[in-house]
């Protein structure tokens, strides 16, 4: 019955109420006034007072607008309005009012660890500033620097560098930049980072997600006495230590579009390096002992250099030229010819050479006379009886004991010892 007051909050040392008299009450007895008039719910369109706390001899009253904005009044011990100010970041007043106003689970400001991969830890604070070792704020021209300060850029790593610090930034487009700041976190200078692998070891982190921290080499070939590798520094390495250069500049996989170095081998006082184009063409560099370019020439036929690089470059199964050779005869059966099949061939009116061996491929004293020429003809043909009889007589001695009706003529050859 009658007027009453409703508790709004008592999170701190001061309790705050709303009375049915249409006025806010500090500690349930001090009415809030503006220019002598009572101030309560609905007095200021869109705004509601939500918290109050003593501040010295006065009080602070926190207001919230329907659009989410905050403002703060200062009133005297009698509740009379003195002044006001906006609240840009509500976290700034959470500790004072002892309440989590933005529902982030924390009361007041806090810092979030970004990384501690090296000796320096790096944080982001809700004060809107990056922190070195959780206590040194990053600043630029006197202003705090934090997430969102520089459009599209985020600071991701920091590490001590002598008396200063290095801070690594990453852009939304993947580019990297590096700041140098002094021991107080104040900006000194900056530089771009062309290859992020260059700074991985310094920050002690794998920044490009290749599974490694810092530069490394990949072996391309070890076929001869010289090795060829490719380094993530963008250069080819001979024997894992000699950089390939052209006019003083490092030469690597991306130096010449379409061309890749495949092989390297020692040559005189330097090296030869074989290149291949994506169109299949080959070229060869001559470099000195320091890997410096001396000259180059096109390779018309890659077989010419296969033996030198000890590699089958054209995929024909051979390493260099595969020249034919004639081996001495071996005492094993190699080729059999049916004499009956030869004699029954009606097209053979004259004795025909079945096999003829290239006798000029070996010295004469290494060739068996009995196998220089084997011939058979129509033994039943008229006019050839003497010849046929002579052949039959000699062959019967050579193959004495063979019971097959077909006379089998066999040569004792290796596969590569004859020419058809």
Image (cartoon, rainbow, N blue to C red):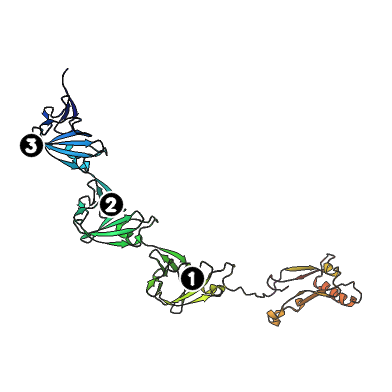
Residue identified by numbered label 3: 57
In primary-sequence order, the first of circles 3 and 1 is 3
Task: Using residue 325 as the reference point, say whether residue 346 is left or right of it.
Answer: right
What secondary structure is marked by label 2?
A: loop
Evaluate whether residue 98 shows in this view: no
Q: Write the residue at 26% across / 49% down.
A: 124
How far apart marks 2 and 3 lie (CA) works out to 45 Å
Instruction: Name the residue nearer the viewer: 232 or 195.
Output: 195
Q: Secondary structure at mark 1?
A: strand
In terms of sequence position, does the residue under pointer 1 or pointer 2 come before the other?
2
The residue lying toward the viewer, choosing from 43 and 93, is: 43
**Image: 200 above or below 54:** below
Q: Identify the image quadrant of the N terminus.
A: top left
Q: Is residue 254 magenta?
A: no
Q: Position of residue 122 (x, y in %)?
A: 26, 52
- Furthest residue in direction top, as rendered: 1
């Amino acid at each position: 019955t009658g007027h009453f007051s409703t508790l709004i909050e008592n999170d701190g040392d001061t309790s705050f109420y709303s009375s049915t008299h249409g006025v806010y009450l500090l500690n349930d007895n001090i009415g809030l006034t503006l220019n002598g008039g009572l101030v309560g719910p609905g007095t200021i369109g869109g705004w509601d007072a939500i918290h109050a706390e003593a501040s010295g001899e006065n009080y602070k009253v926190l207001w919230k607008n329907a659009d989410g904005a905050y403002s703060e009044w200062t009133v005297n011990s009698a509740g009379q309005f003195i002044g006001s100010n906006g609240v840009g970041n509500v976290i700034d007043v959470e500790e004072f009012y002892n309440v989590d106003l933005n529902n982030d689970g924390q009361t007041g400001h806090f810092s979030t660890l970004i990384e501690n991969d090296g000796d320096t830890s790096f944080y982001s604070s809700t004060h809107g500033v990056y922190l070195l070792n959780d206590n040194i704020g990053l600043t630029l021209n006197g202003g705090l620097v934090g997430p969102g300060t520089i459009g599209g850029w985020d600071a991701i790593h920091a590490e001590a560098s002598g008396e200063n610090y290095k801070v690594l930034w990453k852009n939304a487009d993947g580019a990297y930049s590096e700041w140098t700041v002094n021991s107080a976190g104040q900006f000194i200078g900056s530089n771009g980072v062309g290859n992020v692998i260059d700074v991985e070891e310094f920050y002690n982190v794998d920044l490009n997600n290749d599974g490694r921290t810092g530069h490394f080499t990949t072996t391309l070939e070890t076929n001869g006495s010289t090795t060829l590798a490719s380094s993530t520094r963008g250069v080819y390495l001979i024997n894992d230590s000699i950089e390939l250069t052209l006019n003083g500049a490092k030469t690597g996989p991306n130096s010449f579009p379409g061309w890749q170095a495949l092989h390297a081998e020692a040559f005189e006082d330097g090296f030869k390096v074989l290149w291949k184009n994506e169109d299949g063409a080959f070229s060869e560099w001559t470099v000195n002992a320091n890997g410096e370019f001396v000259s180059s020439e096109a390779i018309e036929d890659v077989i010419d250099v296969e033996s030198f690089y000890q590699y089958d470059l054209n995929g024909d199964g051979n390493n260099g030229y595969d020249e034919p050779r004639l081996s001495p005869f071996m005492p094993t059966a190699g080729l059999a010819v049916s004499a009956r099949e030869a004699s029954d061939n009606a097209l053979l009116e004259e004795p025909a050479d079945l096999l003829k061996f290239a006798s000029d491929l070996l010295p004469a004293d290494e060739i068996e006379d009995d196998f220089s020429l084997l011939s058979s003809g129509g033994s039943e043909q008229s006019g050839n009886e003497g010849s046929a009889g002579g052949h039959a007589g000699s062959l019967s001695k050579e193959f004495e004991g063979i019971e097959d009706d077909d006379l089998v003529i066999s040569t004792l050859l290796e596969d590569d010892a004859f020419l058809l």
